[in-house]
């Protein structure tokens, strides 16, 4: 008979196995769609994969603000997931043999990364203003929510036209690598894999909550960190799977795109939180996560532009090492604040 303590962990493991299998399929069919449409793996990763893998954050956030009445969990999950996504960037650099991720990735990612700096720093800016009583709102929705939605729309349009322009010449001459699959079949199979990932990933936060309760962990710190990690597992699986099949640009775009979609989720959470502007009802310590994410993205931009050579002790480059240091610093500050 399975003990009470073992059961949540087995459920967690089952979710990981399901997400792992479906995540590989997502990467494969996402790569095929990018090839057949000529849009490029960067745009597919930035929009399609990022949206699918970020849906657990959306579900967790909406439930946290509407049902549970826990705005700090919603904001902590979103910004914690942004930091975690950038840590996955470091993980990819560690797993990618030969040249570093920064050397092999397209410099076109600088565009989406720059939008990430803009949107996340705007959230940190709005959070600090709200904490000091300076806020504009329409009803119970903050003005920053409308600005975030506009920013996200501009980002999607800008990246779409950038990818379309830079992929046009390649698409005209490149052979179809999967002639056995039509575009419709590829999209249908991508959608099927996406549904599997979303269903399994949506269960992760609830399984994680049961584990935290059973283990007696501190809910405000470990719970938030664990939930942020749990909802980021699809990004980990899909990004590593994409890198393994040679679609590194799609993997990087998925991580950067997930951060952008996470900020868009924050706007959705604000709409569902009816007690007032969301950022006015959360702890200012979330600003640490916001600006940690900004520093990590800035380091990624430097790496993508400068393309440094060499690795530290044959592991990761100095850029990734600095990003990892910021990640550890962010976690440590949150730990000190909660204890």
Image (cartoon, helix red, strand yellow):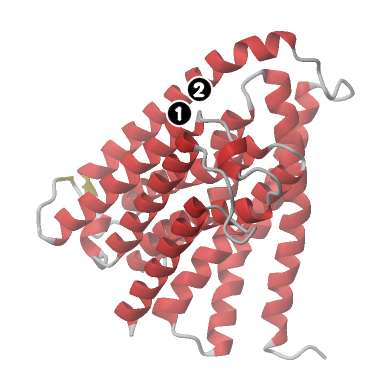
Residue at 58% across, 88% down = 214
The spot of residue 123 in percent (x, y) is: 28, 49
Q: Quadrant of residue 56?
A: bottom right
Residue at 75% across, 35% down = 29
The spot of residue 110 in percent (x, y) is: 45, 33
The crowding category of the residue bearing disc 1, from other C-alpha atoms within 10 Å (few below 14, some 14 to 19, many at least 20), is some
Position of residue 309 relative to residue 205, above or below, is above
Residue 65 visible at all = no
Which label is found at residue 160?
Answer: 2
Q: Determine whether label 2 and label 1 are within 8 Å by CB.
A: yes
Q: Is residue 55 left or right of residue 322?
A: right
Q: Is residue 63 left or right of residue 52?
A: left
Please state, as top left, top right, bottom left or bottom right, where the C terminus lies in the image.
Answer: bottom left
Q: Is residue 23 left or right of residue 219?
A: right
Name the one closer to the observer, 184 or 230. Answer: 230
Q: Is residue 22 left or right of residue 214?
A: right
- Which residue in the protein does label 1 denote? 156
Position of residue 303 relative to residue 2, above or below, is above
Q: Quadrant of residue 290?
A: bottom left
Name the one closer to the observer, 147 or 85. Answer: 85
The crowding category of the residue bearing disc 2, from other C-alpha atoms within 10 Å (few below 14, some 14 to 19, many at least 20), is some
């Amino acid at each position: 008979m399975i003990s009470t303590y073992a059961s949540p962990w087995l459920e967690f493991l089952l979710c990981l196995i399901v997400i792992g299998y479906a995540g590989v399929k997502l990467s494969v069919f996402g790569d095929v769609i990018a090839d057949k449409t000529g849009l490029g793996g960067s745009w597919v990763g930035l929009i399609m994969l990022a949206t699918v893998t970020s849906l657990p954050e959306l579900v967790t956030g909406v439930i946290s603000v509407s049902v549970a009445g826990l705005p700090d969990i919603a904001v902590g999950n979103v910004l914690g997931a942004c930091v975690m996504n950038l840590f996955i960037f470091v993980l990819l650099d560690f797993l990618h043999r030969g040249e570093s991720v920064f050397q092999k990735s397209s410099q076109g990612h600088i565009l989406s990364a720059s939008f990430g700096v803009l949107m996340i720093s705007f959230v940190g800016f709005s959070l600090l203003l709200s904490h000091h009583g300076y806020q504009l709102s329409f009803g119970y929705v903050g003005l920053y929510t409308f600005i975030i939605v506009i920013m996200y729309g501009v980002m999607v349009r800008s990246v779409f036209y950038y990818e379309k322009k830079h992929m046009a010449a390649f698409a005209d001459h490149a052979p179809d690598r999967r002639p056995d699959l039509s575009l419709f079949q590829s999209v249908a199979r991508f959608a099927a894999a996406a549904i599997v990932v979303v269903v399994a990933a949506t269960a992760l936060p609830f399984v994680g909550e049961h584990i935290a309760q059973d283990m007696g962990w501190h809910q405000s710190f470990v719970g938030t960190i664990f939930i942020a990690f749990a909802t980021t597992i699809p990004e980990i699986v899909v990004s590593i799977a994409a890198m393994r099949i040679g679609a590194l640009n799609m993997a990087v775009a998925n991580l950067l795109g997930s951060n952008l979609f996470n900020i868009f989720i924050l706007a959705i959470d604000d709409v569902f939180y009816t007690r007032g502007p969301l950022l006015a009802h959360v702890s200012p310590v979330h600003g640490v996560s916001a600006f940690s994410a900004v520093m990590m993205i800035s380091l990624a931009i430097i790496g993508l532009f400068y393309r440094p050579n060499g690795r530290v002790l044959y592991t990761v480059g100095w850029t990734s090492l600095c990003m990892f240091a910021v990640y550890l610093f962010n976690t440590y500050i949150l730990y000190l604040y909660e204890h």
